[in-house]
Amino acid sequence: MLVLTFSTGVNDAVGYLGLDRVFTGNMTGNVVILAMALTGAGGLPVLGPAIALGCFLLGALVAGRTLRDEASGWSLRTSGLLSCVAAVMAAVAVALFARMDQVELARYVITGALASAMGLQAATARHLSVKEVTTVVVTSTLTGLAADSRFGANTGTHGGRRLWAVGAIMAGAAAGAALLQFHLGLGVMLSALCTLGVTAAGETARRGHNSQEPAPAT
């Protein structure tokens, strides 16, 4: 989940810096940008954030429907959904290497594709129920980190995990911004590889767990 959080940071850097100030994973940012843009403030974009928001919700809806009858935890459907996320990001990276982002309509398609992939990822991560690691936002993580610290409620729960999550998304954003100096597609390709690696690791663990389960009595 921390690797997926890193991947989100990369994609958000690519979206905001390379696709006209659009977040593909952080929908809070898009909602705020969209609200300000609708008032005509600062020449902010309207269509890009609106497309990202709608496609993110669509991706989350598809994941929720797919996992509807699945118990929490990693399953074959989890692997399938994250494989789709990796495939979408790989396709976007190829389009960026082909400089399709120079075409205005293609930029919106790319934005929508990345946002839908992030929606799939976020809903899948939510189903896995890893506390304090949502992979797409850190506001609630930071709130819990401060509120539950020894200077706050002093509950001491998940402090290390929260710090890692914040660090992961920051590292991802920094990596995305750095790669942007070379090519827009490099960051998205890195995200695709990260997601593919997570999928392979999760599927391997799932199969190993299933092979260790005792056979039913005859």
Image (cartoon, rainbow, N blue to C red):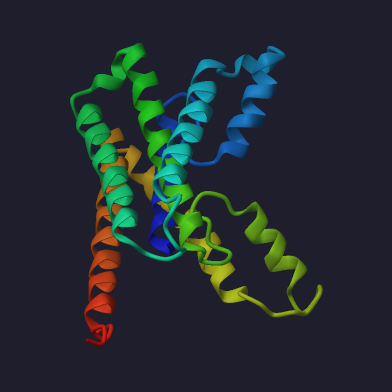
Front residue of this view, candidates 83 and 43:
83
Percent position (x, y) of residue 210?
26, 76
User: In the picture provided, is 201 more to the left or to the right than 161?
Assistant: left
Front residue of this view, candidates 31 and 120:
120
* Outermost front residue: 218
Percent position (x, y) of residue 46?
57, 17
Which quarter of the rendered picture does the C terminus lie within? bottom left
* Outermost right residue: 152
User: In the picture provided, is 146 more to the left or to the right than 43?
Assistant: right
> Does any portion of residue 183 appear in the rendered image?
no
User: How many numbered discs sit on the rendered protein?
Assistant: 0
Which quarter of the rendered picture does the N terminus lie within? bottom left
Query: In percent of the image, x 40 and y 56: which residue is there?
Result: 4
Query: In percent of the image, x 71 and y 60: which residue is there?
Result: 143
Query: In percent of the image, x 60 and y 19: which residue is there?
Result: 44
Q: Quadrant of residue 100?
A: top left
Q: Is residue 55 above or below residue 85?
A: above
Q: Quadrant of residue 26?
A: top right
Front residue of this view, candidates 110 and 43:
110
Percent position (x, y) of residue 111?
40, 27
> Does any portion of residue 56 appear in the rendered image?
yes
Percent position (x, y) of residue 19?
42, 26
User: In the picture provided, is 95 more to the left or to the right than 114?
Assistant: left
